Image (cartoon, rainbow, N blue to C red):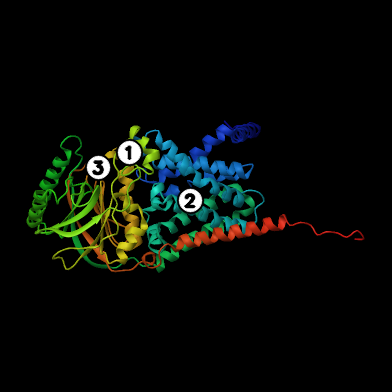
Amino acid sequence: MQIPVAARTNARDRAGGAARAALASPWWRALLAAAAGALPALAFPEPSLWWFAYVALVPWLLLIRSAGSAGRAALDGWLGGIGFVLAVHHWLMPNLHVFILLVAALLGLLWLPWGWVVRAMLSGAQSPGRALAAVVVVPSGWLMVELVRSWEGLGGPWGLLGASQWEFAPALRLASVGGVWLVTLLVVAVNTAVAQLVSAAAVRVPALVGLLVCALTTTLVWVWAEPPRPAGAVKVAVVQPGVYNGSGGVDRRFDEGEKLTRTLAGQDVDLVVWGESSVGRDLAGRPDLADRVAALSRVVGAPILVNVDARRSDEPGIYKSSVLIGPDGPTGERYDKMRLVPFGEYVPARSVLGWATSVGRAAGEDRRRGEAQVVMTLPGRDGLRIGPLVCFETAFPDMTRRLVRDGAQLVVAQSATSTFQASWAPEQHASLAALRAAESGRPVVHATLTGVSAVYGPDGARVGEPLGTDDRGTAVYAVPLSQATTAYVRYGDWAVYAAFAVLAVLCAGSFRRSARGTRAPRARRARG
């Protein structure tokens, strides 16, 4: 049965009227903005719909484009930012409870100016030049938001849009050239061009040109930036004891790690890695524990990198430290974690926000910070140099880059996500190692207490099979090494500086136009 044309037209008119009514209602528009901002979360693990990232921003962009004023566009940016933060960090609710709403509201403010930029570039009469400029300006504005919220005190660079592309090989190649920042720029540029395609018929050709430029850039980088060439390999064992909480959990975790490590005897490994907080006692105060690990090193025939989470006997306060132990005991190589998890390991402005400990699982006592990164040399292993990171630090591109510039041949990340076992957090955290490997051209071992433990080669590709959150045991990986120097290691955050330059030019142009528009008219003489 064929539906009459008039009926179809009436149905479209009713749907269009309902949509216009929803956009005109402040409350419905607010809900739509928050929902649109939350959509990109589906591109990250655990859903890992990486391809969705290239269109996930389109509804949000179209909503801001329809704003009747710059103020309304900025508000849509803020509300969408709240939705984005809540969706990407929803697994923090057990720790922060209702406090996460305040965090999301504050971080969402960073998207206020982005909303203004989107409306300025996408609304009103469109020209080809303006359409092409939007494909550059809108991503640059988004990148500035990511840069600001990447500050450790604001939560760090978790949920960067480019990080959603951790399993897409062409995007990893882009990361080797410009870091995760360049990947973010490309993803937002594609979203901007798609939004123009579906909303403005007059600029569809420039929008297609923008998409073509994005595709061509990715292709050229794929051809020009060769993957790191292998330069030998190293056998690394990861020990994952599983969840041990409650009374006596610290000692039972150590015992299980010791038991599992003994099974590695005879497997000719070069390094054994335990996860974050694998040792809950200060080794200087408990030399018996150091002796037990040294005995394990002799049994396995390889040094063991443990992570001590305890109050130190030689320094005030609690530190999280990577400690290398060989057959003769601790080698003296120690790295104290520098960048701490807000609320999880310290409470920012505790005198003001200390009440967060009463409504969630915020840190009751602040951990102490290390002062410098450390590159360790493995004893008796041809001088292999490793760069340790602890947990949250794998989110920071600059830390891996610094380790490689200081000579690290292998990056080792020790982590524990037992608090968030049933959430998306373990998968999200493990995926960050792929980005750091691709950026630095060095393999990254991501070892955890409770999963997900995974290893990535110098090109960011996964090595072997990961240990999931339901796994308890050991895994041995033949990790390929490389001596290549990526463009990102050599040139750093040039993509960020380029985005900043784009916005500076935009602001300068807006200022000049504003100055011309407010210039006083010339005085006229009476005769004139």
Q: Is residue 481 above or below residue 455?
A: below
Residue drawn at x 42%, y 65% is: 221
- The residues bearing labels 2 and 3 have C-alpha atoms spaced at a distance of 32 Å
Q: Of callouts 1 and 3, which one flags the residue occurring earlier in the amino acid sequence?
A: 1
* Residue marked by disc 3: 469
- Under mark 1, the amino acid is Ala
State yes or no: discs 1 and 2 in contact (Cβ < 8 Å).
no
How far from the left and from the top, in percent, is residue 55? 48, 48
Instruction: State the image quarter where residue 401 is shown.
Output: bottom left
Element assignment for label 2:
helix
- Under mark 3, the amino acid is Thr
* Residue marked by disc 2: 145
Element assignment for label 3:
loop
How far from the left and from the top, in percent, is residue 434? 32, 55
Quadrant the C terminus occupies? bottom right
- The residues bearing labels 1 and 3 have C-alpha atoms spaced at a distance of 23 Å
- The residues bearing labels 1 and 2 have C-alpha atoms spaced at a distance of 26 Å
* Residue marked by disc 1: 362
Q: Which circle, 1 or 2, is nearer the viewer?
A: 1
How far from the left and from the top, in percent, is residue 267? 11, 57
Q: Of callouts 2 and 3, which one flags the residue occurring earlier in the amino acid sequence?
A: 2
Q: Nearer the viewer, residue 495 or 203?
A: 495
State yes or no: discs 1 and 3 in contact (Cβ < 8 Å).
no
Classify residue 396 as left or right of residue 249: right
How far from the left and from the top, in percent, is residue 228? 31, 66
